[in-house]
Image (cartoon, rainbow, N blue to C red):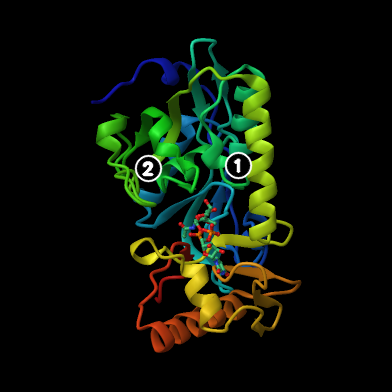
Amino acid sequence: MISRTDFELSIDRPLPRRRATVADAPALSALTTLGVGGPADVLCRPADARGVRRALAAARAEGSRWRVIGRGSNLVVDDAGVDGWVLDLRRLRALVVQDDGRVVAGAGLPTATLLGETRRRGLGGLECLVGYPATVGGAVRMNAGGRWGVVGARVASVVAIDRVGNVHTFDRAACRFGYRTSALADHVIVEVHLRLPRVDGVAYRRAVEEIHREKASRQPLCLPSAGCMFRNPDGISAGLLVDRAGLKGRRRGGAQISEVHGNFVVNRGGATASDVLGLVDDARSAVARVHGVDLTLEVEIWRRRAT
Ligand code: EPU
């Protein structure tokens, strides 16, 4: 399954690496959609797959942990920040769109750009990504979606790098897409190959606008959030359970359980990770008490490892 051709041709730049001290390290809050969280020990922005492999090798050589950030949309970073290396993949934003529906997208490309550019070329099938503030790699890794389908259904193959720097091509079956899961969690996705249908541009545009309107009426899209905090247990809306437990609107500091949708915690200004995680605990306890359901987190929580 290992394929080294094609994308390695684009590998030619050295890894721009920034070794930051805790004092001057930029907070990761600026790289997340929720806007909370402290710094990483090392933040680097590889320009291509070779840069990713170098970063992984350097982190491994110093015995450090590494993590990957895309749009930071499904993520809560602790106020103390995180140990080890954070790889920000936003520079991997290549996009090739072919008229026959074959599309190659860099992992760091915003899903909104993918949606807009493919639609402009008469391709559809990405209704599931409307209103998702993600990168292509992040969306594919968690098989993002909802009522309008999942992105995994449009994936032909994924190029990803494993912990020891080997490059693999996963076909769709090997990706093992499930409800907000895939087999790609331990890999760094660098490139995604999609297969999109040709569509009637006017009808598709209308459908996308309608989904946007619908989502905007049900979700707090205008406030900073990490998207849905919990997975839906057995097909029931976690938001509905939080709502019926009476927690919508609850505040802690600058964070609030959205008044619009119970599965969103929004940053009303100046929220900390501790405010957000406090609300997560509140919601979990209330839902367990009222409905007897144990909610599982959908968002990732990044914490500094205790030393
Ligand atoms: N509902 C309430 N109160 C609430 C929230 C929802 O009564 O506070 C009700 C709604 O009225 C509706 C039902 O619950 O009857 C389902 O709500 P919704 O359509 O909003 O869907 P969801 O199951 O809550 C899922 C995804 C969303 C995705 C939407 C729409 C999960 C955890 N959530 O939400 O994904 O946008 O469907 O497709 O799977 C995300 O993954 O970050 C996310 C937001």
* Residue 57 marker: 2
Determine crowd level at label 1: few under 14, some 14-19, many 20+ residues with C-alpha closer than 10 A: some
Ligand 1 within 8 Å of disc 1? The answer is no
Q: Secondary structure at mark 1?
A: loop
Say what amino acid the circle numbered 1 marks: Val
Determine crowd level at label 2: few under 14, some 14-19, many 20+ residues with C-alpha closer than 10 A: some
Ligand 1 within 8 Å of disc 2? The answer is no
Which residue is at the front of the view, 295 or 8? 295
Whether residue 277 is visible, yes or no, is no
| Quarter of the figure with the N terminus | top left
* Residue 130 marker: 1
Report x, y in % for residue 185.
Answer: 35, 49
Residue at screen point 49% across, 48% down? 147
Question: In which quarter of the view is residue 235 placed?
Answer: bottom left
Drawn side of residue 259 relative to residue 184, left or right:
right
Residue at screen point 45% across, 16% down? 9
Which residue is at the front of the view, 88 or 176? 176
Report x, y in % for residue 145.
Answer: 48, 46
Question: In which quarter of the view is residue 90 placed?
Answer: top right
Say what amino acid the circle numbered 2 marks: Ala
Whether residue 208 is visible, yes or no, is yes
Report x, y in % for residue 33.
Answer: 64, 57
Report x, y in % for residue 165.
Answer: 33, 37
Drawn side of residue 73 relative to residue 120, left or right:
left
Tags 2 and 1 touching, CB below 8 Å? no
Where 175 falls versus 193 (above or below)? below
